[in-house]
Image: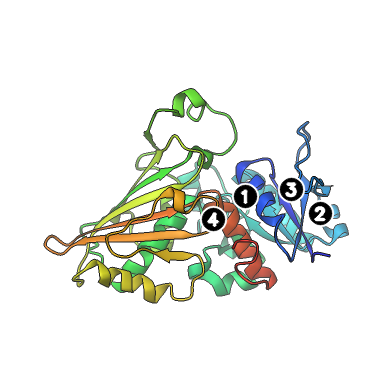
Amino acid sequence: MKGPWVGIVGHRGYSGAELVRILARHRSVAPVLLEHRDDHFDPIAIRNGKSLPRFPCTADAVRREGIELVFLATPPDVSMELAPMMLDAGARIVDLSGAFRLRTPENYTAWYKAPHTQPALLAEAACGLPEFCRERIRGARLVSNPGCYPTAANLAIRPLVEAGVVDRAAGIVCDAKSGVSGAGRKPSLETSFCEVTENFSAYSILKHRHVPEVLEISGLAEREFSFTAQLLPLKRGILETIYFRAVGVESAANLIEIYEQRYAGEPFIRLYNPGHMPDLRGVCRTNFCDIGVTFDATTGRAVVVCAIDNLVKGAAGQAVQNMNLMLGYPETEGLL
Protein backbone atom coordinates (compact mmCIF):
# COMPACT_ATOMS: atom_id res chain seq x y z
CA MET A 1 0.00 0.00 0.00
CA LYS A 2 1.42 3.37 -1.01
CA GLY A 3 1.63 6.28 1.40
CA PRO A 4 -0.29 9.57 1.38
CA TRP A 5 -2.40 10.83 -1.47
CA VAL A 6 -1.09 13.76 -3.47
CA GLY A 7 -3.43 15.67 -5.76
CA ILE A 8 -2.82 16.91 -9.30
CA VAL A 9 -4.80 19.85 -10.63
CA GLY A 10 -4.37 20.44 -14.37
CA HIS A 11 -3.53 16.84 -15.21
CA ARG A 12 -4.62 17.25 -18.85
CA GLY A 13 -1.89 19.75 -19.65
CA TYR A 14 1.58 18.64 -20.70
CA SER A 15 3.19 19.25 -17.31
CA GLY A 16 0.23 17.72 -15.47
CA ALA A 17 0.30 14.61 -17.66
CA GLU A 18 4.02 14.32 -17.00
CA LEU A 19 3.29 14.47 -13.27
CA VAL A 20 0.87 11.56 -13.68
CA ARG A 21 3.53 9.57 -15.53
CA ILE A 22 6.20 10.16 -12.87
CA LEU A 23 3.98 9.72 -9.81
CA ALA A 24 2.52 6.47 -11.16
CA ARG A 25 5.93 4.86 -10.51
CA HIS A 26 6.63 6.65 -7.22
CA ARG A 27 6.90 4.10 -4.41
CA SER A 28 5.83 6.32 -1.52
CA VAL A 29 2.81 8.37 -2.62
CA ALA A 30 -0.46 7.70 -4.41
CA PRO A 31 -1.56 10.29 -7.00
CA VAL A 32 -5.17 11.40 -7.34
CA LEU A 33 -6.73 13.70 -9.93
CA LEU A 34 -8.48 16.84 -8.71
CA GLU A 35 -11.05 18.05 -11.22
CA HIS A 36 -11.18 21.80 -11.50
CA ARG A 37 -13.49 22.02 -14.50
CA ASP A 38 -16.08 19.95 -16.30
CA ASP A 39 -15.19 18.47 -19.67
CA HIS A 40 -15.52 15.25 -21.62
CA PHE A 41 -11.98 13.92 -21.79
CA ASP A 42 -11.47 10.22 -21.15
CA PRO A 43 -9.88 9.33 -17.80
CA ILE A 44 -6.09 9.11 -17.67
CA ALA A 45 -4.92 5.54 -17.10
CA ILE A 46 -1.59 4.33 -15.78
CA ARG A 47 0.25 1.42 -17.31
CA ASN A 48 -1.66 -1.33 -15.55
CA GLY A 49 -4.85 0.06 -17.05
CA LYS A 50 -6.42 1.28 -13.81
CA SER A 51 -7.67 4.85 -13.75
CA LEU A 52 -6.45 7.08 -10.96
CA PRO A 53 -8.93 8.16 -8.27
CA ARG A 54 -10.75 11.43 -9.02
CA PHE A 55 -12.15 14.01 -6.64
CA PRO A 56 -13.55 17.50 -7.09
CA CYS A 57 -11.00 20.25 -6.62
CA THR A 58 -12.54 21.62 -3.42
CA ALA A 59 -11.27 22.26 0.08
CA ASP A 60 -13.85 19.81 1.45
CA ALA A 61 -12.58 17.00 -0.79
CA VAL A 62 -8.94 17.69 0.04
CA ARG A 63 -9.73 17.77 3.76
CA ARG A 64 -12.01 14.75 3.68
CA GLU A 65 -9.60 12.55 1.72
CA GLY A 66 -6.55 13.63 3.71
CA ILE A 67 -4.60 14.79 0.66
CA GLU A 68 -1.24 15.97 2.00
CA LEU A 69 0.12 17.85 -0.99
CA VAL A 70 -1.37 19.35 -4.14
CA PHE A 71 0.39 20.07 -7.43
CA LEU A 72 -1.05 23.04 -9.29
CA ALA A 73 -0.25 22.55 -12.99
CA THR A 74 -2.51 25.46 -13.84
CA PRO A 75 -2.30 28.98 -15.30
CA PRO A 76 -1.17 31.69 -12.86
CA ASP A 77 -4.64 33.12 -12.27
CA VAL A 78 -6.01 29.67 -11.43
CA SER A 79 -3.11 28.99 -9.07
CA MET A 80 -3.79 32.25 -7.25
CA GLU A 81 -7.46 31.25 -6.95
CA LEU A 82 -6.78 27.71 -5.68
CA ALA A 83 -3.70 28.11 -3.47
CA PRO A 84 -5.40 29.75 -0.46
CA MET A 85 -8.17 27.14 -0.53
CA MET A 86 -5.74 24.21 -0.65
CA LEU A 87 -3.62 25.64 2.15
CA ASP A 88 -6.69 26.26 4.32
CA ALA A 89 -7.64 22.61 3.77
CA GLY A 90 -4.29 21.55 5.24
CA ALA A 91 -2.49 20.58 2.05
CA ARG A 92 0.95 21.78 1.07
CA ILE A 93 1.42 23.05 -2.48
CA VAL A 94 3.90 22.78 -5.31
CA ASP A 95 2.82 25.32 -7.92
CA LEU A 96 4.08 24.86 -11.48
CA SER A 97 2.78 28.19 -12.78
CA GLY A 98 4.39 31.60 -12.62
CA ALA A 99 1.97 32.82 -9.95
CA PHE A 100 4.42 32.81 -7.03
CA ARG A 101 7.84 32.99 -8.68
CA LEU A 102 8.55 36.70 -8.35
CA ARG A 103 9.12 38.46 -5.04
CA THR A 104 6.81 41.45 -5.25
CA PRO A 105 3.36 42.14 -6.72
CA GLU A 106 4.84 45.07 -8.61
CA ASN A 107 7.43 42.87 -10.31
CA TYR A 108 4.75 40.32 -11.15
CA THR A 109 2.51 42.98 -12.72
CA ALA A 110 5.40 44.44 -14.70
CA TRP A 111 6.29 41.11 -16.34
CA TYR A 112 2.96 39.26 -16.41
CA LYS A 113 0.81 42.31 -17.27
CA ALA A 114 -1.80 41.34 -14.67
CA PRO A 115 -2.42 42.17 -10.99
CA HIS A 116 -1.34 39.74 -8.30
CA THR A 117 -4.26 38.77 -6.07
CA GLN A 118 -2.34 36.93 -3.32
CA PRO A 119 0.58 39.14 -2.25
CA ALA A 120 0.91 37.47 1.18
CA LEU A 121 1.40 34.06 -0.44
CA LEU A 122 3.78 35.59 -2.96
CA ALA A 123 5.96 36.71 -0.06
CA GLU A 124 5.71 33.30 1.63
CA ALA A 125 6.45 31.05 -1.37
CA ALA A 126 9.79 29.25 -1.44
CA CYS A 127 11.68 29.04 -4.70
CA GLY A 128 11.61 25.41 -5.85
CA LEU A 129 15.13 25.10 -7.23
CA PRO A 130 16.51 22.39 -4.91
CA GLU A 131 20.16 22.85 -5.80
CA PHE A 132 20.02 26.34 -4.27
CA CYS A 133 16.98 26.35 -1.97
CA ARG A 134 16.84 22.84 -0.51
CA GLU A 135 16.53 23.68 3.18
CA ARG A 136 13.78 26.25 2.70
CA ILE A 137 11.85 23.86 0.46
CA ARG A 138 11.80 21.17 3.18
CA GLY A 139 9.76 23.30 5.57
CA ALA A 140 7.65 25.30 3.13
CA ARG A 141 3.86 25.20 2.82
CA LEU A 142 4.02 26.65 -0.68
CA VAL A 143 6.80 25.97 -3.16
CA SER A 144 6.96 27.76 -6.49
CA ASN A 145 8.49 25.60 -9.21
CA PRO A 146 10.84 27.70 -11.37
CA GLY A 147 10.19 28.09 -15.07
CA CYS A 148 11.94 25.76 -17.48
CA TYR A 149 14.20 28.41 -19.03
CA PRO A 150 15.29 29.86 -15.65
CA THR A 151 15.98 26.37 -14.27
CA ALA A 152 18.58 25.72 -16.96
CA ALA A 153 19.93 29.28 -16.95
CA ASN A 154 20.39 29.54 -13.19
CA LEU A 155 21.96 26.11 -12.84
CA ALA A 156 24.50 27.17 -15.47
CA ILE A 157 25.07 30.79 -14.45
CA ARG A 158 24.81 31.13 -10.66
CA PRO A 159 27.91 29.08 -9.72
CA LEU A 160 29.99 31.23 -12.07
CA VAL A 161 28.62 34.49 -10.66
CA GLU A 162 29.17 33.23 -7.11
CA ALA A 163 32.77 32.36 -7.96
CA GLY A 164 33.38 35.83 -9.42
CA VAL A 165 34.67 34.57 -12.77
CA VAL A 166 32.15 36.46 -14.95
CA ASP A 167 33.13 39.84 -16.42
CA ARG A 168 29.78 41.39 -15.55
CA ALA A 169 30.55 44.62 -17.39
CA ALA A 170 30.68 42.60 -20.61
CA GLY A 171 27.35 40.94 -19.78
CA ILE A 172 26.00 37.44 -20.29
CA VAL A 173 24.08 36.34 -23.39
CA CYS A 174 21.70 33.39 -23.07
CA ASP A 175 20.51 31.91 -26.35
CA ALA A 176 17.70 29.53 -25.31
CA LYS A 177 15.85 26.99 -27.46
CA SER A 178 12.80 24.99 -26.40
CA GLY A 179 10.53 22.30 -27.73
CA VAL A 180 6.93 23.28 -28.48
CA SER A 181 5.47 21.64 -25.36
CA GLY A 182 6.97 24.52 -23.38
CA ALA A 183 4.18 26.72 -24.73
CA GLY A 184 1.52 24.53 -23.10
CA ARG A 185 -1.30 22.47 -24.55
CA LYS A 186 -3.76 25.27 -25.31
CA PRO A 187 -4.00 25.55 -29.12
CA SER A 188 -2.60 28.61 -30.85
CA LEU A 189 -1.61 29.55 -34.38
CA GLU A 190 2.04 30.00 -33.39
CA THR A 191 2.36 26.45 -32.05
CA SER A 192 0.28 24.69 -34.71
CA PHE A 193 1.94 22.00 -36.82
CA CYS A 194 2.16 24.00 -40.05
CA GLU A 195 3.75 26.97 -38.27
CA VAL A 196 6.30 24.97 -36.28
CA THR A 197 7.42 22.10 -38.50
CA GLU A 198 10.47 22.85 -40.67
CA ASN A 199 10.70 26.20 -38.93
CA PHE A 200 12.74 27.92 -36.21
CA SER A 201 11.71 31.23 -34.63
CA ALA A 202 12.49 33.64 -31.79
CA TYR A 203 9.80 35.13 -29.57
CA SER A 204 9.22 37.54 -26.66
CA ILE A 205 12.55 39.25 -27.38
CA LEU A 206 13.66 41.53 -24.50
CA LYS A 207 10.37 40.96 -22.67
CA HIS A 208 10.23 37.27 -21.81
CA ARG A 209 8.54 36.77 -18.43
CA HIS A 210 11.17 34.25 -17.33
CA VAL A 211 13.91 36.89 -17.30
CA PRO A 212 13.23 38.19 -13.76
CA GLU A 213 13.50 34.64 -12.38
CA VAL A 214 17.01 34.37 -13.78
CA LEU A 215 17.91 37.74 -12.30
CA GLU A 216 16.53 36.88 -8.85
CA ILE A 217 18.41 33.60 -8.52
CA SER A 218 21.63 34.44 -10.36
CA GLY A 219 22.13 37.85 -8.75
CA LEU A 220 22.56 39.56 -12.11
CA ALA A 221 21.09 42.96 -12.97
CA GLU A 222 18.82 43.23 -15.99
CA ARG A 223 21.40 45.30 -17.89
CA GLU A 224 23.92 42.45 -17.44
CA PHE A 225 21.75 39.74 -18.97
CA SER A 226 20.48 39.32 -22.51
CA PHE A 227 18.00 36.49 -23.11
CA THR A 228 16.31 35.27 -26.28
CA ALA A 229 13.87 32.35 -26.37
CA GLN A 230 13.49 30.36 -29.58
CA LEU A 231 11.05 27.66 -30.61
CA LEU A 232 12.40 24.38 -31.95
CA PRO A 233 10.28 22.08 -34.15
CA LEU A 234 10.51 19.41 -31.43
CA LYS A 235 8.11 18.18 -28.75
CA ARG A 236 10.34 18.62 -25.71
CA GLY A 237 13.73 19.71 -24.43
CA ILE A 238 15.61 22.94 -23.70
CA LEU A 239 19.14 23.72 -24.79
CA GLU A 240 20.71 27.00 -23.72
CA THR A 241 23.98 28.35 -25.08
CA ILE A 242 25.42 30.94 -22.68
CA TYR A 243 28.19 33.34 -23.72
CA PHE A 244 30.32 35.47 -21.39
CA ARG A 245 33.83 36.81 -20.81
CA ALA A 246 35.64 34.95 -18.05
CA VAL A 247 38.12 36.54 -15.64
CA GLY A 248 40.60 34.89 -13.31
CA VAL A 249 40.55 31.50 -15.05
CA GLU A 250 43.06 29.86 -17.35
CA SER A 251 41.17 26.95 -18.85
CA ALA A 252 37.82 25.26 -19.28
CA ALA A 253 38.95 22.83 -16.59
CA ASN A 254 38.98 25.73 -14.11
CA LEU A 255 35.33 26.44 -14.91
CA ILE A 256 34.37 22.79 -14.61
CA GLU A 257 36.07 22.72 -11.19
CA ILE A 258 33.75 25.54 -10.06
CA TYR A 259 30.75 23.46 -11.05
CA GLU A 260 32.20 20.35 -9.43
CA GLN A 261 32.66 22.13 -6.12
CA ARG A 262 29.23 23.77 -6.22
CA TYR A 263 27.35 20.64 -7.28
CA ALA A 264 29.25 18.00 -5.34
CA GLY A 265 26.75 15.34 -4.37
CA GLU A 266 23.91 16.78 -6.45
CA PRO A 267 22.06 13.80 -7.96
CA PHE A 268 20.68 15.53 -11.06
CA ILE A 269 23.62 17.62 -12.27
CA ARG A 270 25.90 15.98 -14.83
CA LEU A 271 29.09 17.73 -15.98
CA TYR A 272 30.83 17.05 -19.29
CA ASN A 273 34.57 16.98 -19.80
CA PRO A 274 35.99 20.28 -21.15
CA GLY A 275 35.19 20.78 -24.82
CA HIS A 276 32.36 18.22 -24.84
CA MET A 277 28.79 19.43 -24.98
CA PRO A 278 25.41 18.02 -23.96
CA ASP A 279 22.48 17.60 -26.29
CA LEU A 280 18.73 17.14 -25.95
CA ARG A 281 18.76 13.41 -26.61
CA GLY A 282 20.83 12.87 -23.48
CA VAL A 283 18.27 14.49 -21.15
CA CYS A 284 14.94 13.59 -22.80
CA ARG A 285 12.45 12.19 -20.24
CA THR A 286 14.97 12.56 -17.39
CA ASN A 287 15.36 14.96 -14.47
CA PHE A 288 19.02 15.60 -15.30
CA CYS A 289 20.63 18.93 -16.08
CA ASP A 290 23.69 18.44 -18.29
CA ILE A 291 26.38 21.14 -18.48
CA GLY A 292 29.39 21.52 -20.79
CA VAL A 293 32.00 24.30 -21.07
CA THR A 294 34.38 25.62 -23.72
CA PHE A 295 36.92 28.40 -23.06
CA ASP A 296 39.36 30.37 -25.20
CA ALA A 297 42.25 31.59 -23.02
CA THR A 298 43.51 34.12 -25.61
CA THR A 299 40.29 36.16 -25.68
CA GLY A 300 38.67 35.12 -22.41
CA ARG A 301 35.55 34.02 -24.25
CA ALA A 302 33.63 31.24 -22.54
CA VAL A 303 30.61 29.24 -23.66
CA VAL A 304 28.43 27.09 -21.44
CA VAL A 305 25.85 24.71 -22.92
CA CYS A 306 23.09 23.50 -20.61
CA ALA A 307 20.40 20.95 -21.51
CA ILE A 308 17.27 19.82 -19.67
CA ASP A 309 13.91 18.28 -20.50
CA ASN A 310 11.48 21.19 -20.17
CA LEU A 311 8.68 18.90 -18.96
CA VAL A 312 10.79 17.04 -16.38
CA LYS A 313 13.62 19.04 -14.76
CA GLY A 314 11.91 22.13 -16.16
CA ALA A 315 8.49 21.26 -14.70
CA ALA A 316 7.04 17.98 -13.41
CA GLY A 317 10.27 16.22 -12.44
CA GLN A 318 11.51 19.18 -10.45
CA ALA A 319 8.05 19.43 -8.85
CA VAL A 320 8.35 15.81 -7.69
CA GLN A 321 11.90 16.52 -6.49
CA ASN A 322 10.42 19.33 -4.39
CA MET A 323 7.62 17.10 -3.12
CA ASN A 324 10.17 14.50 -2.02
CA LEU A 325 11.98 17.14 0.02
CA MET A 326 8.76 18.47 1.54
CA LEU A 327 7.43 15.05 2.55
CA GLY A 328 10.73 13.60 3.71
CA TYR A 329 11.33 11.04 0.95
CA PRO A 330 14.64 10.41 -0.83
CA GLU A 331 15.10 13.29 -3.24
CA THR A 332 15.56 10.96 -6.20
CA GLU A 333 12.46 8.82 -5.50
CA GLY A 334 10.44 8.32 -8.70
CA LEU A 335 13.05 10.19 -10.74
CA LEU A 336 15.90 7.72 -11.21
The amino acid type of the residue labelled 2 equals Ala
Tell me which corner region of the image, top left, top right, bottom left or bottom right, holds residue 63. bottom right
Residue where numbered disc 4 is placed: 286
* Few, some or many residues within 10 Å of mark 3 (<14, 14–19, 20+): few
Callout 3 secondary element: loop
Q: Which mark is residue 117?
A: 1
Look at discs 4 and 1 and give the one toward the viewer. 4
Residue where numbered disc 3 is placed: 47
The amino acid type of the residue labelled 3 equals Arg
What residue is rendered at 36% in x and 69% in y?
159
Lower position in the chain sequence, tag 4 or tag 3: 3
Lower position in the chain sequence, tag 2 or tag 1: 2
Residue where numbered disc 2 is placed: 59
Residue 301, position as x, y percentages in the image: 19, 58
Residue 219 visible in the snapshot: no
Tell me which corner region of the image, top left, top right, bottom left or bottom right, holds residue 292. bottom left
The amino acid type of the residue labelled 1 equals Thr
